[in-house]
């Protein structure tokens, strides 16, 4: 079992390395019109993996390595983006005051009429959209003419206009999916490599990331807040995992919560006793020489984790406003923690137990701009959403997607976005959106 949890030491050491900074930036982000602090502004350092978010009063904090020049990018959904250049002059502390201008939102007169039916955002006759992600008010697209071995990344707006395109090199391997990491970046995962995607002046900037670093330091981290990283040791072949938090400038991780399916764990451990004697002996040898618990070895040897009796755990952690939420579907509770990682309360949840258990798709989607949580279900091939109150756990209403078998479902600004191709059609996969009503 030790083998499967070794990466936590790497995670701790990796995050600690990032904290060995020598320049401290103390900043304040203000609204240009009102002069008030702006909360939840994302501050990113170009070409260096360091990010921060402004707090309720607009203050933010960054630690950076010793370097003469820095470029900081400030982004917020309600404000125009800003790039700020810093020239370090032998100082170890720098104070900044940044002002952002609110975006002017112009509503199209036909958008109200069109909200009742799906909008086609990106649809090309010569290639398909396989995945997408959001970048400010634009879209990042993963497209290909036929196969993802020859994929490209494109930057587009919601009208389908393409601003920039990047063709993946062959040595990258087949493109798989976009991963939105805790720093706010979009990472493209391929079979042989990982790329970080950024945008500067409507031009794509693509940087390779070592795949081992991505697996150890980025993918396990669910989110960050208040100078804390929140990550898990989840492994889909074991019915128990923990959530931890790691403070900046701290080498020790702290336990936040444990998730397990008690009944499934009992069945999992009993697999060892059902093995014939010679396989029990082999499981004990694996435990002795590979330092893997005999019960884990037995469950893998027997194929239990591939059977109908095994169900991988799904208990996601989300940070909504300043509350840490863990949706533990295996004991039917939603847990709330405050900014100091203290348990506030727990509320009962039942939305994941529909009349037909097959309808529940074990997928929660957060609309970060609206601070709403949606549970995804599917009945007769039609996806439908239920709004789950992240404070009370109560569910409200059903919204049925109009297109059958929609894929890559994501939600933003009260709209549900997805990829879809009509069954039996020669149409390529198009990107659509619908307003949730």
Image (cartoon, grey):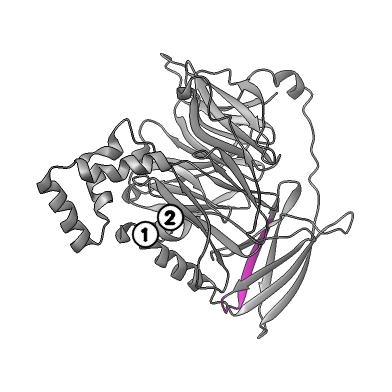
Is residue 34 within the magenta segment?
Answer: no
Residue 78 location (% of width, % of height): 76, 46
Disc assigned to residue 233: 2
Residue 193 in sight from this viewpoint: yes
Left or right placement of residue 406 versus residue 216 in this view: right
Disc 1 target residue: 5
Residue at screen point 50% across, 66% down: 253
- Check contact, mark 2 vs mark 1: CB within 8 A: yes
Q: Secondary structure at mark 1?
A: helix
- Label 2 to label 1: alpha-carbon separation: 7 Å
Callout 2: SS = loop
- Badge 1 density bin: few <14, some 14–19, many ≥20, Cα 10 Å: few
Residue 253 to residue 323: above or below: below
Query: For this rendering, which residue is in front, 79 or 167?
Result: 79
Q: In screen coordinates, is 74 left or right of 56?
A: left
**Count of labels shown?**
2
Question: Where residue 104 sits in the image (x, y, percent)?
Answer: 81, 42
Q: Earlier in the sequence, mark 2 or mark 1?
A: 1
Tell me where residue 134 appears, x and y as whole percent.
59, 42
Segment tinted magenta in the rendering:
65-74
């Amino acid at each position: 079992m030790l083998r499967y949890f070794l990466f936590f030491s790497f995670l701790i050491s990796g995050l600690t390395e990032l904290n060995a900074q020598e320049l401290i930036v103390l900043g304040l982000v203000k609204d240009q019109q009102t002069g008030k602090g702006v909360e939840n502004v994302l501050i990113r350092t170009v070409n260096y993996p360091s990010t921060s978010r402004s707090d309720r009063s607009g203050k933010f904090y960054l630690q950076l390595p010793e370097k003469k020049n820095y470029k900081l990018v400030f982004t917020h959904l309600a404000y125009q983006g800003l790039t700020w250049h810093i020239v370090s002059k032998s100082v170890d502390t720098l104070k900044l005051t940044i002002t952002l201008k609110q975006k002017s939102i112009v509503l199209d007169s036909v958008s109200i009429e069109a909200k009742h039916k799906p909008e086609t955002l990106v649809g090309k006759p010569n290639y398909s959209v396989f995945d997408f992600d959001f970048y400010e008010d634009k879209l990042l697209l993963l497209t290909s003419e036929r196969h993802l071995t020859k994929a490209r990344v494109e930057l587009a707006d919601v009208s389908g206009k393409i601003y920039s395109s990047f063709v993946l090199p062959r040595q990258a391997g087949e493109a798989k999916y976009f991963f939105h990491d805790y720093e706010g970046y979009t990472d493209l995962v391929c079979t042989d490599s990982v790329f970080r995607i950024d945008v500067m002046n409507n031009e794509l900037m693509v940087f390779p990331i070592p795949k081992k670093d991505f697996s150890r330091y980025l993918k396990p981290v669910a989110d960050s807040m208040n100078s804390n990283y929140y990550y898990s040791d989840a492994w889909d072949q074991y019915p128990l995992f923990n959530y931890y938090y790691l403070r900046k400038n701290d080498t020790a991780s702290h336990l936040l919560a444990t998730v397990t399916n008690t009944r499934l764990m009992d069945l999992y451990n009993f697999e060892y006793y059902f093995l014939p004697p010679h396989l029990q002996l082999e499981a004990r040898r694996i435990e002795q020489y590979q330092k893997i618990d005999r019960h884990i070895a037995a469950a893998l040897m027997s194929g239990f984790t591939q059977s109908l009796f095994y169900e991988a755990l799904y208990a996601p952690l989300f940070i909504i406003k300043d509350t840490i939420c863990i949706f533990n579907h295996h004991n039917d509770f939603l847990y709330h923690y405050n900014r100091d990682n203290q348990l506030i309360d727990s509320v009962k949840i039942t939305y994941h137990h529909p009349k037909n258990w097959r309808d529940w798709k074990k997928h929660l989607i957060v609309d970060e701009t609206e601070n709403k949580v949606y549970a995804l279900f599917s009945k007769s091939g039609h996806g439908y959403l239920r709004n789950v109150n992240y404070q009370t756990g109560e569910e409200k209403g059903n919204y049925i997607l109009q297109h059958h078998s929609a894929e890559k479902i994501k939600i933003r600004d009260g709209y549900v976005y997805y990829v879809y191709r009509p069954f039996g059609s020669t149409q390529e996969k198009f990107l659509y959106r619908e307003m949730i009503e």
